[in-house]
Image (cartoon, rainbow, N blue to C red):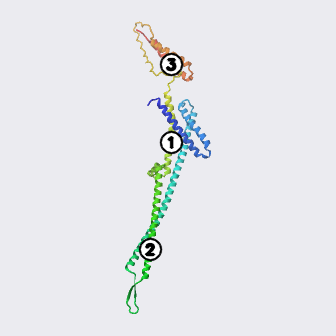
Amino acid sequence: MNKKILPWLLLICALGLSSTAAYYSVLGLSIVFSAVALPVIIMGSFLEFSKLIIATYLHNQWKNTYFGLKLYLTSALVLLSLITSIGIYGLLSKGFTENIAKLNVNQSIIENIEVKKDRFLITKQEKQNEKIILSEDISELRKQLSSGTRIEYKDRETGEIISTTSSAARKTFENQLDLSTQSRDTISKQVDVLNDSITKLELKILDLESTEELNGELGVIKYMSEITGKPLKTVANWFILVLIFVFDPLAIALIIATNQSFKNLRPKISMYGEPKPITPPNPKVTPKLAKPNTGVPLPQSKPTPEIDNQIKSIQQELTKVHQSPASSKKKGLAINNLTEQLKKYQDLKDNQIEY
């Protein structure tokens, strides 16, 4: 990726994430302290903005800041990050509470419908048992009517057993058969009504459950709760804590990375206010060792133009250092360094011999 594009991408991500974290934090704090929502929003907004400025300042001026100020600003940055996390936690926990309340309402409705359904099932079973008994009675009455309603009695004079047909008994059996048939039909209609009611309740339960599945606000958390065996609220707290401990620290890290990226794009400036050259420095000139005296007179020394140019350049840099607005400490270090280089080239000039 182009080095000039990366800092701008980091800046966009850093500002977007920081703004989102600040918005959620301020909104969450206003929910936690709803009685004084407006003052909390104003205070939280400035604290969030100050947090970004503190992070930028500490990154750029860490070496030039006193220890006490560094300690206080670092502590304030950590505390502000915790406050941001508390605000985000308040907002997310409010959303979870609303969703869990909806889920509890649906569960309560489903449980009530299940109770009503169970009552209908019990009533249906009782009616079916009653219907079975009536069917048995009807079968017995029909059997009696088909076999005839005969009455047997003993004659007093002759002592013989006399069998005869009783029309009154037959009429009684027919009336009982009609009543039993009507009762069975009535019970059959009641069972049908109960079956319709049970079917409607089951459809209502399925509708509520399908609506809950389609909405799916707590789907992942519910599945994690089932897998881990932990309560739903515990799993939701785990998710919220993971989010808040990644959210704000990542925003601060992106702010620092953005500052570092833009800093790397700037040209390096020398201590006397000029851009440092990108070209490699001139190769070092190795001094030539003087040959031992063998009694032959040595020729006169003659400095080369290269060494003279180096000496002249170092003298110009010394002049610039003396005139630069840098601190005395930096100027002293630069002067010592340039003086050592000047001395080295002066020695080279003195020892340079041309044969």
The answer for how far apart the CA atoms under marks 1 and 2 are is: 76 Å
Q: Is residue 82 visible?
A: no
Q: Is residue 89 left or right of residue 158?
A: right
Location of mark 3 (residue): 338
Amino acid type, callout 3? Leu
Residue most toward the top? Answer: 297
Label 1 secondary element: helix
Q: Say if 156 sits above or below 167 in the image.
A: below
Residue at point 50%, 45% (across, down): 241
Proximity of marks 3 and 2: CB atoms separated by less than 8 Å: no
Location of mark 2 (residue): 180
The answer for how far apart the CA atoms under marks 1 and 3 are is: 51 Å
Residue at point 50%, 29% (across, down): 262
Residue 179 x %, y %: 45, 74
Q: Is residue 329 visible?
A: yes
Q: Quadrant of the C terminus?
A: top left
Q: Residues within 10 Å of mark 3 (few under 14, many from 20)?
A: some
Q: Residues within 10 Å of mark 2 (few under 14, many from 20)?
A: many
Q: Nearer the viewer, residue 306 or 36?
A: 36
Location of mark 1 (residue): 245
Residue 20 x %, y %: 53, 39
Amino acid type, callout 2? Ser
Residue 108 x %, y %: 51, 57
Q: Residues within 10 Å of mark 1 (few under 14, many from 20)?
A: some
Q: Is residue 351 left or right of residue 28?
A: left
Earlier sequence position, callout 1 versus callout 3 = 1
The answer for how far apart the CA atoms under marks 3 and 2 are is: 126 Å
Q: Quadrant of residue 165?
A: bottom left
Residue 308 x %, y %: 47, 12
